[in-house]
Amino acid sequence: MLVKRIISAAAGIIYLIIVLYFRGWLFNISVLIISLLGMHEFYASVRKKGHKPVSLLGYLYTIVFFYFVATGLNSPIIPASAIIAAIAALFITVIIPRTTVMDACFTITGFIYPGMTLITLIMMVNLPQPYAHYLLIFTMAATWSTDTFAYFIGIRYGKNKLCPGISPKKTVEGSLGGLGGSVLSGIITGWILQRFYQLPIGYEHYIIMSIICGFASQAGDLAASSIKRFCGIKDFGNILPGHGGILDRFDSIMFTVPVIYAYYLICLV
């Protein structure tokens, strides 16, 4: 299992480097595919609880949202998408036979999580110079450092349960270790970005964003665990050997990227 996990992670990192280098349509299409696969995993999971989300409508929402973001028309579409999704949830229960309110809610949830949250990757990678894709690299480094430090420190020193009702294996010690790992990684990555790429972000912002990533990453992990517990499943899928499904691997990213993007709009513009 560990060998599969390492090989799968290595392949993923190599592919990530390639798509970040070329960006453009390759990155955009990759994100769209990951979003749709994640939505499929989410819809398949809630169906195991007997619910019947209108997945085709969720996919359609995501593709339209992707089009506006990929073509640079994302500014007005974000608040508009939330309003349209809320209105659509009401119509789903009226138009489609035998569709319950919960089915409608799960349909819209799939559009937002993981649909919209993952497509935020495109919005961040297309930030204007000098930020461009560097802020995304920083966010990913801080997020994955949180996961890594939390995992290993939790195994070595974990004693006090963090949220036993949601994820019995997570500990307070592991959570604090993950937060520390995020800050450490954020400072190192920030120094590299300033030293070699002249990214005009003060160290105070790197520290704040690292702390945000540390908390948001673990919140995303717990959210995914809560959904899996609700659906009665261990993993969302098996598309990534050793890692489970798309949502198992990107659960933290789906929280940190939108939050750091919002931080950029509020504090760095």
Image (cartoon, grey):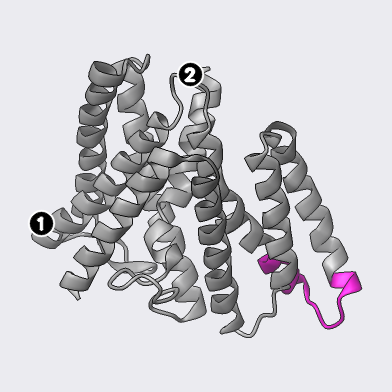
**Residue at x 58% of width, y 63% of height:** 36
**Residue at x 29% of width, y 41% of height:** 141
Q: Camera-side residue: 46 or 25?
A: 25
Helix, strand or loop for disc 1: helix
Helix, strand or loop for disc 2: helix
**Residue at x 68% of width, y 36% of height:** 74
Residue 245, placed above or below residue 124 = below
Tag 2 residue: 268
Which mark's residue is nearer the viewer, 2 or 1? 2
**What is the quadrant of residue 151 in the picture?**
bottom left
Pinpoint residue 71: horizontal percent, then vertical percent: 67, 38
**Residue at x 71% of width, y 34% of height:** 73
- Label 2 or label 1, whichever comes before in sequence order: 1
**What is the quadrant of residue 238 in the picture?**
bottom left
Pinpoint residue 201: horizontal percent, then vertical percent: 37, 17
Most common secondary structure along the magenta stretch: helix
**What is the quadrant of residue 206 in the picture?**
top left
Tag 1 residue: 157
Residue 145, placed above or below residue 167 = above
| Total numbered badges shown on the rendered structure | 2
Q: Camera-side residue: 200 or 187?
A: 200
Pinpoint residue 126: horizontal percent, then vertical percent: 53, 32
Query: Is residue 103 found inside the magenta-colored segment of the image?
Result: yes
Left or right: where 112 falls relative to 91:
left
Q: Split into 4 quadrants, where in the image is the N terminus? A: bottom left
Q: Amino acid at mark 1?
A: Tyr
Q: Amino acid at mark 2?
A: Leu
Q: Residues within 10 Å of mark 2 (few under 14, many from 20)?
A: few
Left or right: where 158 falls relative to 167:
left
Query: Is residue 171 found inside the magenta-colored segment of the image?
Result: no
> The magenta stretch spans which residues?
93-107
